[in-house]
């Protein structure tokens, strides 16, 4: 009983304590400043920053950004719970616009520890003020498109552990002050346009675990003491200009797992060295260099390898011992393409690599047994240019295969029906073979899930294959198809690229992306409006007789428009239809019969040519292959007076306008000055008049300018002399006058670029400015002197003629009046009275 009472008392005490704690917590909660955690100065700075950089709110909820709410609750904001100071700002993917100025309100957030500003529309230089954010630990400015040199003020960020600057347009070398970032563990500098030798100050940053210098302009040799970075896990210097031998110390770094060095100029023997303990390297990319000679057998000691790329290793037509790769049991990716070996390889050798998923053997002669069985794990198989003469039957049971390339072989006959039943197949490249048709019914391909199909350069003929609605890229050029282009193509709503060139098609064009060298004589139907994913429209070298298709501006993803060498006619501007191409990068309507005047705002709305905007190619990288070399768009263009072919990644950089060889009139639109990213501008062979607009001086990336064979007058704008990248220009056959602007690029031009402009003077012409005026003044003086002399001679001649004439007249008069007076008077009267006809 007593025990029971004691328990009850204890329960009452515990409940009382719980009640006290609950009340205390409630009092604390109501009295705490949580609702007003954000400091007013921090809130104001953030509010101003929103106005400065114009957030679009794509990745953050701007509705939560309100001056009446606690800024610590705003989307993308983190605060110190004790002080209310902003410590984290994450605006990644918010489509920021503008320039980060040195007095930006951002730099008033002095206690920031994490800053993410990844955006595609920022510009300008990275200000020194970034060094004032001295508590930063993570700084992410990837894709911000900053330019100029990287500020040395970054060296002030002594707490920095992660620095992400990839995807900018910096110039020059890394500042030496980067060597002070001794807490740095991760450095990402891919695609930043940096140059110089390997930045040695990085060797001071011994805590680094990741270095990414991919796709820059670095050169020279790597330092031999790279092993000092003992904690380095990933080292990527692909796509640079490094040369010499690869230091063997790299392979002995205890923590290194990923070593990517492809597409450089490394050469000489590859010395992996004596590895006392098993290497941890799992990814080794050495392809695309200048290695030659035999492949070192020591590669077989890297037993932990999962991904290995030795492509373009020049074995000098020697034999290769492919059995060395059998020791690498963990391989999932192997690229041995273009090894320049005379060895024939039995493909069954690779069947022992049980984990292999991606196998690339381009350019190696293969022996394929009818009973071959590759591991079922295979997903990507590239056997291009392998001297294969029969369709590989071992593929039939590869249910995981999504990427197949057997192009450039000697396979003939029909494509087997079972290929389209492979459930994972998305990409098939059967081009450059001797195929003549498809087994099975007409809809055999239509029932598949294929997204990319290349059957070009074969002997295919009718019936034209029905394609699945999933199709994104289809190429069938250089075959024997004829008749009308199937209108079923218009139902392919995901279609992005269609290549039908060099066949025997006729009739109308329901949907076209690239139809070169086909003789069409009818207009383009508006069926293309339904293809909203259309990016690449090339109809060059046909006989299409139509007006300009203004409705193309309704295609939001159109990037390349080529109508060159057809019979298009009429104006290319319309009061009824506005012409705005926000993603257009190539506009070529040359060699047609277009006429009319271009309004001054014609190029307003051509955003991709106006600013630095990343255009994502519609070709998914998954289907382009890990080396992105198996499918590439191409188009021929004129640049600097020569025809060039743009291939693959060049499309993302090249921006051009070519309206040459038409009958356009009037002035060049002033809005041409908005296209600051333009590289080539060709308006030659038209009837353009007026003066050359000074706004062309805004085109700071311009490399080629052709305004020849028009009717331009006035002077060449001096602003053009400041275009440092302008390598070729042509102003010939116009009516220009005055001095040619001074500038290194202009002065280096041939005089033929300025010929047939009678009023032009100055280098590179031999005509000196001012000499013509002197010659004209001298000529005028000589003309005046000559005129005076002529007048004197005329007076002398008159005087000489006057005296004899006077004497002769006097004598005749005397005779007539003295001896024949009556006869003289009759003649005189007859002259005064013409009615008198006889005398």
Image (spheres, rainbow, N blue to C red):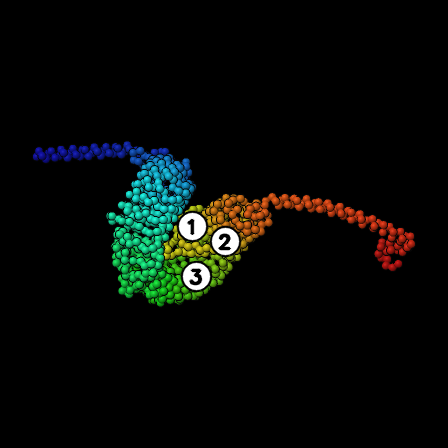
Q: Residue at x 33, y 58 (%)?
A: 318
Mark 3 crowd level (few <14, some 14–19, many ≥20, 10 Å Cα): some
Image x and y of residue 368, in percent: 30, 63
Question: Which residue, given by chain and number where applicable, does mark 1 sit on?
Answer: 653
Badge 3 marks a residue whose secondary structure is: loop
Label 2 to label 3: alpha-carbon separation: 25 Å
Q: Is residue 481 left or right of residue 814?
A: left
Report the front residue among 803 and 406: 803
> Which circle, 1 or 3, is nearer the viewer?
1
State which quarter of the image contains the C terminus: bottom right
Badge 2 marks a residue whose secondary structure is: loop
Mark 1 crowd level (few <14, some 14–19, many ≥20, 10 Å Cα): some
Lower sequence index among marks 2 and 3: 3
State the mark number for residue 479: none
State the mark number for residue 641: 2
Q: Residue at x 84, y 49 (%)?
A: 806
Lower sequence index among marks 1 and 3: 3
Mark 2 crowd level (few <14, some 14–19, many ≥20, 10 Å Cα): some
Label 2 to label 1: alpha-carbon separation: 19 Å
Q: Are marks 2 and 3 in contact (CB under 8 Å)?
A: no
> Which circle, 2 or 3, is nearer the viewer?
2
Label 1 to label 3: alpha-carbon separation: 25 Å
Q: Can you see residue 405? A: no
> Which circle, 2 or 1, is nearer the viewer?
2
User: Which quadrant of the view contains residue 196?
Assistant: top left
Q: Are marks 2 and 1 in contact (CB under 8 Å)?
A: no
Q: Is residue 90 left or right of residue 14?
A: right
Badge 1 marks a residue whose secondary structure is: loop
The relative height of residue 803 versus residue 17 in the rendered view (above or below) is: below
Question: Which residue, given by chain and number where applicable, does mark 3 sit on?
Answer: 501
Q: Is residue 742 left or right of residue 805?
A: left
């Amino acid at each position: 009983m007593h025990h029971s009472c004691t328990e009850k008392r204890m329960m009452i005490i515990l409940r009382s304590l719980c009640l006290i704690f609950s009340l205390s917590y409630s009092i604390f909660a109501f009295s705490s400043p949580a609702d007003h955690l954000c400091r007013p100065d921090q809130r104001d700075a953030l509010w101003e920053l929103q106005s400065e950089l114009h957030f679009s709110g794509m990745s953050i909820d701007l509705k939560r950004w309100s001056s009446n709410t606690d800024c610590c609750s705003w989307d993308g904001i983190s605060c110190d719970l004790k002080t209310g100071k902003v410590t984290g700002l994450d605006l990644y993917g918010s489509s920021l616009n503008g320039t980060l100025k040195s007095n930006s309100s951002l730099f008033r957030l002095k206690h920031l520890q994490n800053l993410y500003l990844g955006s595609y529309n920022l510009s300008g230089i990275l200000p020194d003020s970034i060094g004032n954010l001295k508590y930063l630990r993570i700084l992410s400015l990837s894709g911000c498109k900053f330019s100029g040199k990287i500020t040395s003020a970054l060296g002030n960020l002594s707490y920095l552990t992660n620095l992400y600057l990839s995807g900018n347009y910096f110039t020059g070398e890394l500042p030496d002050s980067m060597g002070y970032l001794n807490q740095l563990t991760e450095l990402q500098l891919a695609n930043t346009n940096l140059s110089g030798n390997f930045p040695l100050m990085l060797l001071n940053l011994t805590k680094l675990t990741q270095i990414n210098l991919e796709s820059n302009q670095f050169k020279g040799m790597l330092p031999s003491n790279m092993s000092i970075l003992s904690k380095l896990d990933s080292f990527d210097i692909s796509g640079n200009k490094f040369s010499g031998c690869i230091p063997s110390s790299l392979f002995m770094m205890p923590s290194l797992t990923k070593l990517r060095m492809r597409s450089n100029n490394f050469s000489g023997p590859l010395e992996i060295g004596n590895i006392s303990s098993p290497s941890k390297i799992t990814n080794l990319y050495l392809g695309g260099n200048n290695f030659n000679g035999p492949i070192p057998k020591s590669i077989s000691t890297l037993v932990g390898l999962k991904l290995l790329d030795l492509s373009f290793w020049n074995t000098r037509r020697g034999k290769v011992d492919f059995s060395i790769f059998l020791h690498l049991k963990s391989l999932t990716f192997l690229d041995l393409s273009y090894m320049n070996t005379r060895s024939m390889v039995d493909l069954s050798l690779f069947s022992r690599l049980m984990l292999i998923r991606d196998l690339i053997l381009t350019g190696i002669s293969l022996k394929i047994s009818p009973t071959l069985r590759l591991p079922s794990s295979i997903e990507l198989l590239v056997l291009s240019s392998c001297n294969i003469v029969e369709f590989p039957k071992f593929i039939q049971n590869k249910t995981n295969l999504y990427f197949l390339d057997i192009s450039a072989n000697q396979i003939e006959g029909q494509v087997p029906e079972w290929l389209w039943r492979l459930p994972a197949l998305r990409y098939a490249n059967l081009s450059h073979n001797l195929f003549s048709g498809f087994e099975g019914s007409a809809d055999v391909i239509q029932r598949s899930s294929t997204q990319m199909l290349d059957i070009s350069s074969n002997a295919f003929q009718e019936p034209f294959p029905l394609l699945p609605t999933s199709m994104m890229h289809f190429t069938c050029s250089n075959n024997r198809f004829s008749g009308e282009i199937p209108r079923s193509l218009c139902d392919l709503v995901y279609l992005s690229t269609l290549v039908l060139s060099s066949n025997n098609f006729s009739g109308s064009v329901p949907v076209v992306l690239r139809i070169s060298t086909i003789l069409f004589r009818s207009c383009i139907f508006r069926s293309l409006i339904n293809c909203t994913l259309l990016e690449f429209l090339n109809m060059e070298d046909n006989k299409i007789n139509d007006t300009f298709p203004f409705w193309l501006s309704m295609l939001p993803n159109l990037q390349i428009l080529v109508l060159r060498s057809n019979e298009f006619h009429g104006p290319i501007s319309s009061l009824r239809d506005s012409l705005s191409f926000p993603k257009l990068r190539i506009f070529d309507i040359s060699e047609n019969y277009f006429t009319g005047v271009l309004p001054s705002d014609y190029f307003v709305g051509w955003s991709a040519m106006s600013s630095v905007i990343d255009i994502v190619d519609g070709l998914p990288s998954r289907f382009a292959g890990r080396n992105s070399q198996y499918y590439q768009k191409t188009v021929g263009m004129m640049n600097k007076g020569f025809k060039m072919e743009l291939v693959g990644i060049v499309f993302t950089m090249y921006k051009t306008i070519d309206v040459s060889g038409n009958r356009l009139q009037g002035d060049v639109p002033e809005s041409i000055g908005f296209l600051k990213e333009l590289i080539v501008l060709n308006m030659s062979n038209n009837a353009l008049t007026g003066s050359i607009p000074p706004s062309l001086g805004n085109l700071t990336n311009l490399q080629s300018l052709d305004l020849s064979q028009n009717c331009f007058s006035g002077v060449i704008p001096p602003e053009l002399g400041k275009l440092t990248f302008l390598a070729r220009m042509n102003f010939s056959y116009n009516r220009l006058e005055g001095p040619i602007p001074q500038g290194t690029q202009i002065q280096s031009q041939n005089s033929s670029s300025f010929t047939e402009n009678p009023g032009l003077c100055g280098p590179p012409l031999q005509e000196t400015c001012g000499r013509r005026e002197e010659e004209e003044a001298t000529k005028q003086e000589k003309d005046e002197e000559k005129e005076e002399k002529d007048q004197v001679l005329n007076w002398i001649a008159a005087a000489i003629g006057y005296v004899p004439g006077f004497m002769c007249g006097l004598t005749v008069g005397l005779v007539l009046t003295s001896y024949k007076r009556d006869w003289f008077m009759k003649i005189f009267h007859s002259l005064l009275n013409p009615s008198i006809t006889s005398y």
